[in-house]
Amino acid sequence: MASLLQPPGPYSPPPVRPEDIVYEDEYLLALNKPSGLLSVPGRGEDLADCAEARAKAQDRNARTVHRLDMDTSGLLLFGKGAEMHRRLSAMFAAREVEKCYLAWVQGVMTAEAGKIDLPLSVDWPNRPKQKIDAEGGKPSLTRWQLLKSSKEASLLALTPETGRTHQLRLHCAAIGHPILGDRIYAPKAAFVRAPRLQLHAERLAFRHPETGAEMKLTAPSPLTGPIVPDAS
């Protein structure tokens, strides 16, 4: 008797929800990526769902320009077609795109603003972790501004001047204020205080590579802040 079970068909990404489209024109597409979704596909059919696949379902010419960690939510920008992808990628490489993130971190900041200037490199035995590396690390600079404090936690606006892997997560942890819900760099006391990584790519500002218009894109923040009291 033939089995009634059918093998799974090819992966088909879900359509982009209208509320997740932050901006779209004939050249660009900007999506608000949810936490828990990959930016690009991983290895294996079970990791096929990603922001890139969903962007291509919206427009088959969409190409990934930059990435966010899976646990990070927020703005992802895609170029439509090879030429727009090339031009946008060059703008990111030249640091012509201003990025701003929101993050809830452990503890109350003692200043209103500051910068974190600590070089980073790959922690090879513990990949994908990164590490502070004063000798051989790449220059890495993050500026921060305190927005508010509540329940032994602080909401920061983070502006990365460089774009290293895990830069914001490691920089915050290195100054004693790990991001709440960070399963890689936060100690347990900070990790358990939030249901997900409290890091959101809120804003992108850049000049439109085709029209020259000043673009200021904002993705609404889903961050909850601390939901568990500090037990450290």
Image (cartoon, helix red, strand yellow):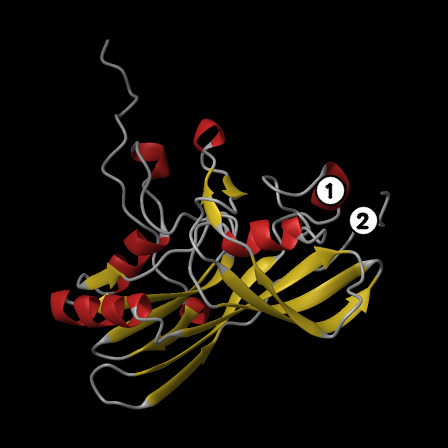
Point 72% across, 51% down: residue: 176
Snapshot quadrant of residue 54: bottom left
Outermost residue on the top side: it is 1
Residue 192 is tagged as 1
Figure quadrant of the N terminus: top left
Outermost residue on the front side: it is 135
The answer to whether residue 43 is left or right of residue 121 is left
Point 46% across, 50% down: residue: 69
Q: x, y percentage for residue 98?
A: 43, 75
> Do callouts 1 and 2 mark residues in contact (Cβ within 8 Å)?
yes
Instruction: Identify the element where label 2 is drawn.
Output: loop
- What separation in Å lies between label 1 and label 2 (alpha carbons)? 7 Å
> Viewer-proximal residue, 36 or 176?
176
> Viewer-proximal residue, 216 or 47?
216
Q: Amino acid at mark 1?
A: Val
Relative height, residue 183 to residue 180 (above, below):
above
Residue 228 is tagged as 2
Q: Amino acid at mark 2?
A: Val
Q: x, y percentage for residue 97?
A: 37, 74
Figure quadrant of the C terminus: top right
Other residues around mark 2 within 10 Å, as few (<14) / some (14–19) / many (≥20): some
Q: x, y percentage for residue 102?
A: 60, 66
Residue 152 is tagged as none
Relative height, residue 222 to residue 190 (above, below):
below
Point 58% across, 58% down: residue: 199
> Viewer-proximal residue, 107 or 32?
107
Relative height, residue 122 to residue 198 (above, below):
above
Other residues around mark 1 within 10 Å, as few (<14) / some (14–19) / many (≥20): many
Point 67% across, 43% down: residue: 186
